[in-house]
Image (cartoon, rainbow, N blue to C red):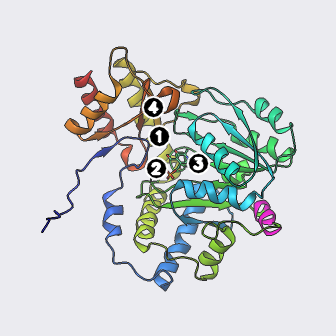
Amino acid sequence: MKEYKDLNPMERVLLGPGPSMASPRVIRTMATPPVGHLDPALLKIYAEEQELLRYVFNTQNEWTFALSGTGTSAMEAAMANLVEPGDAVLVAVIGYFGTRLAEIAARLGAEVDTVERPLGEILSVEEISAALKAKSYKVFGIVHAETSTGAEQLQIGEIAKAAHEQGALVVLDTVTSLGSIPVLVDEWDIDITYSASQKSLSAPSGLAPITVSERAREVIAKRTKTVSSFYLDLQSYANYWMQHGYHHTASASLHYAFREALRITYEEGLGTRYARHRKNADLLWEGLTALDAPPLIPAAYRLPPLTTAVVPDGVAPHELRAKLLNDYNIEIAGGFGALKDKVWRIGLMGYSSRRENVTLLLAALKELL
Ligand SMILES: Cc1ncc(COP(=O)(O)O)c(C=O)c1O
């Protein structure tokens, strides 16, 4: 008989673009025995998660909850609930995840246009305003923290204002940014904002927080066709979370973990948490520059949770990455698309954003370079 050994995976220092490391508190909590998906104890956890999510999103939106799926499920949900076939959608593209958002809208039958900048750059309010005037767009999608390049799209509030002036609803991707840099949903007046559990919030992957404005809810209520996805229907989700009608069997274990990760975020306080991410990123940027692998993105819009470091001349990027993993147990990632062999992507998100991790990575890079 074939022998299947005990599961004994390597403990890694996760400094890639996600997942980040989960705090031991989160791991311990996840071992709590699961209860039924409508058990009163779990319903209380949902209610607390909603409060904590409103805190991290900086919103009062009633429809604030977590989808059973990864960040991509929330990308699909945002578009699937707002878009009907034939609707015009504009997507801002400064990297791979903007392209993915545009593809999702196109697969739903939308007529999709993009407004783009080359990798490593961000868009201006003027460029986006001009693109929004081209036709009557129903939805405008934009990524706050572009994980493929390490750029933060600035001026989200001004951009959302320009979109609303043209009558478009705004969908904002905060998969990498939520929990590490300010995400001000109400102040910026965003219609659907989503994220993922495994990045700057530092829980295991599998849940996708999402928050929906009153304006978006009205548009959803007035749809002519029902949402094509049963699973990602936000009205059904709202009924499940708030009226407790069965929709699907959510994972109690993931919710235990996510609530604990949110509780840690709340205890730390958002201001302190943003400052910690910035401080550790500063240390990383300084060290990388000294190693001749400086950050690609200019400081003005460089993301603390995700740095793209330029691979020094003569260094084989993927071999070094393999050595970091095999010899030092440290995970970082390679570049995407046109940046594939040019950069490494280094994440300092949530529980991974600690001084000792930065010191360890810089020491390992120093030995390998
Ligand atoms: C900006 C952004 N959006 C969306 C996603 C998709 O999330 P997931 O991989 O959890 O489906 C990612 C994942 O890296 C991301 O970085």
Circle 2 packing at 10 Å, graded few (<14), some (14-19), many (20+), is: many
Indicate which disc residue 335 carries.
4
Quadrant of the snapshot with the N terminus: bottom left
Amino acid at pointer 3: Thr
Q: In this view, does 287 lie to the left or right of 230?
A: left
Callout 2: SS: loop
Residue 33 in the image: above or below residue 11: below
Amino acid at pointer 2: Lys
Callout 3: SS: loop
Residue 164 in the image: above or below residue 84: above
Determine which quarter of the picture holds residue 254: bottom left
Residue to which mark 2 is pinned: 199
Q: What residue lies at 47% left-to-right and 37% top-to-bottom?
A: 306
Decide: marks 2, 3 in contact (CB < 8 A)? no
Q: In this view, does 354 lie to the left or right of 231?
A: left
User: Main SS type for the magenta part?
Assistant: helix
* Start-end of magenta stretch: 215-222
Return the disc, 3 or 4, that comes first in the chain's sequence.
Answer: 3
Residue to which mark 1 is pinned: 305
Q: In this view, does 62 lie to the left or right of 41?
A: right
Residue closest to the far bottom = 40
Return the disc, 1 or 3, that comes first in the chain's sequence.
Answer: 3
Residue to which mark 3 is pinned: 174
